[in-house]
Amino acid sequence: MTRPLLLSLLVAASGCQTVLRFSRPAPPEGNFGNVRTLSVTVKTAVGRTVENSVINSLMRGEIGVPIRVDDQIKAQFEQRLVTLGYQVCPAAPCGDGTMTIVLTQSEVGNEMTRYGPQAHSRIACDVKVFANDGTNPYDFSFWDRRTGSIGEGGSLVRTSVNNIGNRFESSLRPGRQHAELPLEDGGELDMGVNMLLSSQWRSAIDYFTRLTQQQPENDGAWYDLGVAWETEGDWGQALAAYERAAALKRKRNYLDAAATAQRMAPASPPQQPQPMPTPVQPIPLEQPAPSPSPSP
C-alpha cells in the first residue's frame, strides 16, 4: 500500500460530526483486461471526416493543409503502450488482441478570422481494444484542437497528437481522488479518530482492528475501520468493514460508504466448484469374542 496520502483539510464541522477530507488512491479509468500483447491499427471514418471538412470549408472558409495524421497517431499510441509495459506486435492477428483507432476528425487547415489568418488542427479519435475472445475491455474517445499562426500546422498537429497520447496514458494509470467522509467519534473511538486526523493511517487501522475484536458490536468502530482502510486505498477491506457496520446499524453514511466501496472494490475471482466430499464410512465395531462355555 502506498503512503503517505495528502490530507488537504483535516477536519471540518458538520453539525456535531467530525469530517475527514483526504486524497486517496484511485484505480485507472480503463484497462485492457487480459490483453498484454497487441497490434495497433489506425483507420479513418471517411464519411465523418469529409462531412466535417466540407462544413468547415463552407462556413469558415478554411483551406485544408495536407498533413498526415494517421501515421503520427499510430506512432504515438505505440510509444505510449511500450511506456506502460505492453508489447506491440507488428500486425494483426497477433498477441492477445488488437487496438483499433478510428479517426473521426483529422483536419489541418488555414482560415481567416477577425484576428487575421490563422492555422488550426482538429483531431478526434475513438480507441477500442478487442481481446482475441471477442471481449471489448477498453473503449474511449479523445480529441484535441489547436490554433496558431499560419505555417504552424505541422507543429499544431504534433502538439495535438501528444496531448491525445497524454490523455490515453493517463486513462491507464492509477490516479487520486479527493474524498470527504464523516467519522464516528466519542468514547473509545476518539483515539483512533485522532490518528486519522493526523494522517496516521496504519496506526488507525491497527487501533480500530483491536477495538472491533474487543467490541464486535460497536458499529462506529467498524465504520471508522472502513474509513481507515479506504484512506490506504484497500477497497476490499474497507467494504468488509462497512458492511459489518451497516449490518449492526443501518445508518445512511454506513450504507453510502458500503455502496461506494462495492463499486470500487476489485471483483472477486470466480469460485472453483469444490469436489463432493467422499462419504466417511463408519468403522465397524469389533465384536467381543464369545465367552468359553463352562465345562460340564
Image: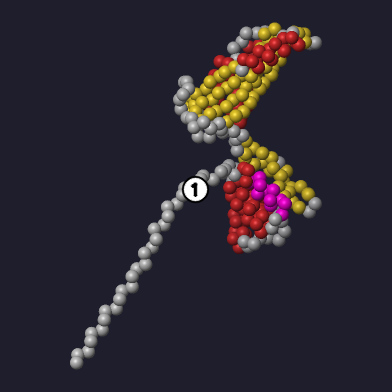
x 63%, y 43%: residue = 263
x 58%, y 47%: residue = 236
Q: Is residue 97 magenta?
A: no
For disc 1, the neighbor class at 10 Å (few under 14, some 14 to 19, many from 20) is few
Total count of labels? 1
**Amino acid type for the residue under numbered disc 1:** Gln
Q: Which residue is mark 1?
A: 271
Residue 277 in view, yes or no: yes
In the current view of this chain or complex, which residue is farthest to the left?
Answer: 296
Q: Where is residue 23 drawn, in percent x and y?
A: 67, 41
Q: Where is residue 51 drawn, in percent x and y?
A: 68, 14
Residue 152 in view, yes or no: no
Q: Quadrant of residue 77?
A: top right
Observer-nearest of 236 and 283:
283
x 46%, y 24%: residue = 93
The quarter of the picture where the C terminus appears is bottom left
x 26%, y 81%: residue = 290
In the current view of this chain or complex, which residue is farthest to the front?
Answer: 296
Observer-nearest of 228 and 61:
61
What is the magenta range? 251-261
- Circle 1 — which element? loop
Q: Where is residue 14 drawn, in percent x and y?
A: 78, 49
